[in-house]
Amino acid sequence: MNHISTRNLRVFTVLGAALLALLISSPSPAAAPTGTISVTPATGTVPYQATLAWNVAGAGSCSASGAWSGAKPASGSVSITVTAANQKYQLDCAEPVQTATVSWDPATKNTDGSALTPTGYKLQESIDGASWRNDTSVAGNVTSYAFAGLSPGTHYFQIATVAGSVSSAWTAPVSTVIPTPLTASFSATPGTVAVPNPPTNVRVTVAVLAYELRQYSNGTLRFVQVGTVPLGKECGTALVGDYAVFDGATITKPTTGGVIAARCGS
């Protein structure tokens, strides 16, 4: 049985969009996401409609909190209803999840010196260099593989050559450190928000009878009883004395199209 060797294992780490040779140079410093978020218009009389817009660069994921929630894209806009001055919209973003790419030079000879044409490669990943996981197989014409979504911390990798049904020994493990993703928070809060005051001098019905205000040919005005009203209901515009316009009376007698009123008080 022939024994197969693998040589020259190199590890690269992908940080954002930049490919860096880990064993040759140090990764470039990571950068936290940057961006803006705003409420337009920022002022108004509540409740009022506004547009919440945001744009974050260098973010792999964003999540909302405060007056909104859920996962959000790195940029966008939504319509909101502002109901209070302290209505805070917060967006927390993290840089993209990092990827480690293992690259290698294929072995060209077996251990006995005979020619070798690899039919594939096996790769494994570990967080301690002892317990291996993420078993992966690639074709013989492949010379790199990306392990995506790795958690922050040190990760180890090893690879073996495959020729038909025979596999080489695993290479010595190599490692790289996946840094903790940098995060940034953005927030927007409406500015001066005018809150309307409640009405004053509110009057309600104090008697159950409904009247129609009629004007006769001689110019006189009279209240004529035409129905009933519920007690304690808000009245409208004042007319004469303690009578005021009332909508919603139960009409039980013929009317002439005049204003319907009821006796009202504070």
Image (spheres, rainbow, N blue to C red):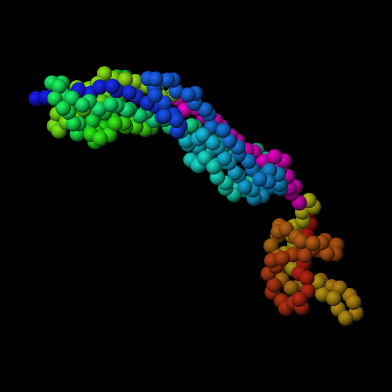
Tell me where the magenta segment starts and ends, as one range: 180-199
Q: Is residue 160 visible?
A: no
- Which residue is located at x 28 percent, y 26 percent? 105
Residue 52 x, y percent position in the rendering: 60, 44
Please indicate whether residue 191 sits to the left or right of residue 17 in the image: right
* Residue 107, quarter of the rendered image: top left
| Quadrant in which the N terminus is drawn | top left
Q: Residue furthest bottom?
A: 217
- Which residue is located at x 62 percent, y 47 percent? 51
Q: Nearer the viewer, residue 55 or 257?
A: 55
Q: Is residue 181 above or below residue 253?
A: above
Magenta stretch secondary structure, dominant = loop
Q: Is residue 169 above or below residue 235?
A: above
For residue 94: magenta? Answer: no
- Which residue is located at x 71 percent, y 48 percent? 45
Q: Is residue 216 visible?
A: yes
Q: Nearer the viewer, residue 67 or 53?
A: 53
* Residue 11, quarter of the rendered image: top left
Residue 127 x, y percent position in the rendering: 33, 22
